[in-house]
């Protein structure tokens, strides 16, 4: 949930091209790091954003 919320904050105010440039590393920094067992959450959030942006 933290990754989804942080991604929302990162995307806010960006245009589509800027949102496409967001990377997993930036997301992980935004949440203050993730334990190894929770790394998949950042991948899921970025993959979901990429899938959404493909439709635009």
Image (cartoon, rainbow, N blue to C red):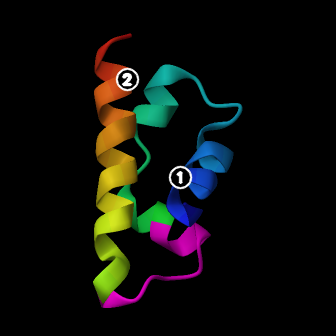
Is residue 11 shown left or right of residue 34?
Answer: right
Quadrant placement of the C terminus: top left
Is residue 5 shown left or right of residue 17?
Answer: right
* Distance Cα–Cα, label 1 vs label 2: 15 Å
Q: Nearer the viewer, mark 1 or mark 2?
A: 1
Mark 2 sits on what residue?
53
Picture residue at 40% right of the left edge, 50% below the top: 45
**Residue 39, placed above or below residue 6:** below
Residue 4 image point, x, y percent: 53, 52
Mark 1 sits on what residue?
4
Task: Answer with mark 1 or mark 2, whichever residue precedes in sequence.
Answer: 1
> As rendered, which of 37 and 55 lies closer to the eye?
37
Answer whether residue 23 is magenta in the image. no
Image quadrant where residue 24 sits = bottom left
Disc ID at residue 45 = none
Picture residue at 44% right of the left edge, 82% below the top: 34
Residue 46 image point, x, y percent: 36, 48
**Pointer 2: residues within 10 angstroms few (<14), some, or many (20+)?**
few
Image quadrant where residue 42 sits = bottom left
Q: Which residues make up the magenta segment?
A: 28-36
Which residue extends farthest top?
56
């Amino acid at each position: 949930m933290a990754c989804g919320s942080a991604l929302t904050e990162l995307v806010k105010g960006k245009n589509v091209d800027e949102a496409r440039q967001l990377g997993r590393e930036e997301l992980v920094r935004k949440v203050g790091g993730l334990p190894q067992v929770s790394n998949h959450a950042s991948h899921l959030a970025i993959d979901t954003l990429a899938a959404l942006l493909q439709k635009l």
